[in-house]
Image: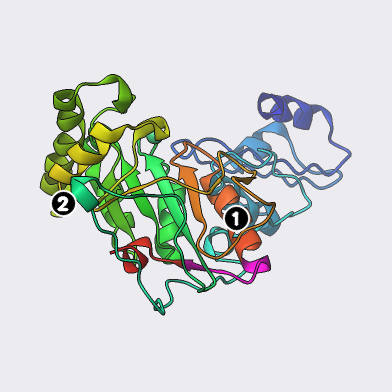
Amino acid sequence: MSESRPRTRAQRRRSRQIRLSITTSVFLAVVVVLGMSLSNGKASSASDSAGVVRDREVATAAPEQDKAGGKDKPRATSTPKVTSTPDSDMAMDPQVGIAPEPTSATSVNAEGGLVPVISRVPTRDRVVFLTIDDGYEKDPAFKNFVVANKIPLTMFLVSNAAAAKPSFFSSIATVKGSSIQNHSVNHPNLKTLSAAGQRKQICGNATMEKKLFGKTPTLLRPPYSEYNQTTRSVAYECGIHAMVLWSVSMPSSKLYYGSGSKLMPGDIILLHFRPTNGVKNMKKLLGIINAANLQIGSLTDYVK
Ligand SMILES: [Zn+2]
């Protein structure tokens, strides 16, 4: 846009001081500042100074804009508007309590070979549980944020999506209280499948996740929350201890409550891996959890 204009302008306007900067891509990363005094400066001296950073404000502003990935306005103006640094972007604010020791755990039993189905955790501890589904989208900023702030996530992964980049999920799983769980092989509506078809999806996920992550999942979230009795018995055969639905969902930036209008102890919150805005939405959720005087529990500490 204005990047190609300044040089010719600079030649014309000799009686004014012009400060120009050009921020190009990382590969072309060149900041050009032309500082010309009133009566000084021919075109040749202007181009001689190209590439030499003389303006401190611009010199510091430019790299930050590069790091922001072009999110901010790509203009390096003379007003050094310093937005938040990458470090402060990564900070958890407010500070939310993480993975407290449960005062009691809920034991789940598969009566008659049918795994139980839960959508909340019966506890008086002031904790909620963050669950996150699918895994097709792998936003590194989101991963870095949850790892840096040690936010325990129960990840219900589609094993085909997990297999595309297992390191993304195994690094999130290093957070204490996080775990990788079962969300089928490729996300069908299990109710539409025969027992054999459901077995392929549930046991298939378990086998794949064991191979990818070294652990067999013990919790199942059926895609679309759709299941039948066959699902419950097949899940049991595949080593599942409980099917986990949810009581609150946050598809993007808003919370939707299954009942009531605020977070309650024991709520299971449904999130999804998204390509963008994961950090922003997580910060918002942390604020809501904090305002409700709740902490984030580890689901596998509470449901055994
Ligand atoms: Zn899903």
User: Which numbered disc flags the more N-terminal residue, 2 or 1?
Assistant: 2
Residue extending farthest front: 112
Dot 2 amino acid type: Thr
Label 2 or label 1, whichever lies nearer to me, is 2
Q: Is mark 2 within 8 Å of ligand 1?
A: no
Rendered view: 187 above or below 182: above
Q: Residues within 10 Å of mark 2 (few under 14, many from 20)?
A: many
Could you tell whether 133 is left or right of 199 in the image?
Answer: right
Could you tell whether 287 is left or right of 179 in the image?
Answer: right
Image quadrant in which the C terminus is located: bottom left
Q: Position of residue 79 (x, y in %)?
A: 79, 52
In magenta, the rendered stretch is: 290-296
* Label ID, residue 216: 2
- Whether residue 238 is visible here, answered yes or no, is no
Q: Please give the name of the residue rendered at 65% of the width and 42% of the height, measured from the top-left corner.
A: 72
Residue extending farthest right: 15
Rendered view: 83 above or below 293: above
Q: Position of residue 294 (x, y in %)?
A: 58, 69
* Label ID, residue 285: 1
108 or 75: nearer the viewer: 108
- Whether residue 222 is visible here, answered yes or no, is yes
What is the C-alpha distance between the residues marked 2 and 1?
29 Å
Q: Please give the name of the residue rendered at 44% of the width and 58% of the height, measured from the top-left corner.
A: 146
Q: Could you say whether the residue bearing mark 1 is in a helix, strand or loop?
A: helix
Residue 291 belongs to the span the image colors magenta: yes
